[in-house]
Amino acid sequence: MSAYIVARVAIHDRAVYDRYASQFMRVLGRYDGRLLVSDEWPEAMEGEWGGRKLVVLSFADRAAALTWAGSPEYQEIARDRIAGADVISVLAQGF
């Protein structure tokens, strides 16, 4: 069953976050993840979004998503994400 990681990203240090972003696709691809959405200005249809970036990732299943998220390669680049942005993320299973 497909799994998705959905994140709301509030960037507060653009240079540090961009360093993370420059490595992101390389690491995601190693774990067969797919970037479905990366939008810094999504349109709020209901409620207050607050100008935050939206990211949606797709994986074959929950185990694959967790393997990517816990991988040494991702943990290494994630230090810049943690330093450059505040992130709320969730893991959800698809149909």
Image (spheres, grey):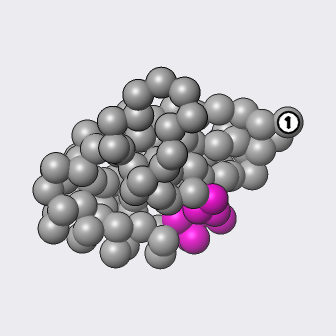
Region rendered in magenta: 28-36
Task: Please name the residue that numbered disc 1 is placed on.
Answer: 95
Q: Which quarter of the figure is the C terminus placed in?
A: top right
Image quarter for residue 86? top left
Placement of 40 over or under 26, stated as above or below: above
Report the residue that reaches farthest toward the top.
47
- Front residue of 17/49: it is 49
- Front residue of 15/82: it is 15
Task: Tell me, yes or no, whether the highlighted magenta stretch contains residue 33.
Answer: yes
Image quarter for residue 37? bottom right
Residue at the image point whose x is 51% and y is 45% from the top: 43
Q: Position of residue 53 (x, y in %)?
A: 39, 49
Residue at the image point whose x is 64% and y is 43% from the top: 4
The count of marks equals 1
- Front residue of 36/33: it is 36
Position of 34 compared to 40: left or right?
A: right
Work out whether residue 79 can be spotted. Answer: no
Q: Position of residue 36 (x, y in %)?
A: 63, 59
Residue type at the position of mark 1:
Phe
SS label for mark 1: loop
**Dot 1 surroundings within 10 Å: few (below 14), some, or many (20 or more)?**
few
Residue at the image point whose x is 16% and y is 50% from the top: 12
Position of 7 compared to 64: left or right?
A: left
Task: Tell me, yes or no, whether the highlighted magenta stretch contains residue 76.
Answer: no
Q: Which quarter of the figure is the N terminus placed in?
A: top right
Q: Position of residue 33 (x, y in %)?
A: 62, 60
Residue at the image point whose x is 59% and y is 52% from the top: 57
Q: Position of residue 25 (x, y in %)?
A: 48, 71
Placement of 87 over or under 64, stated as above or below: above
Work out whether residue 11 can be spotted. Answer: yes
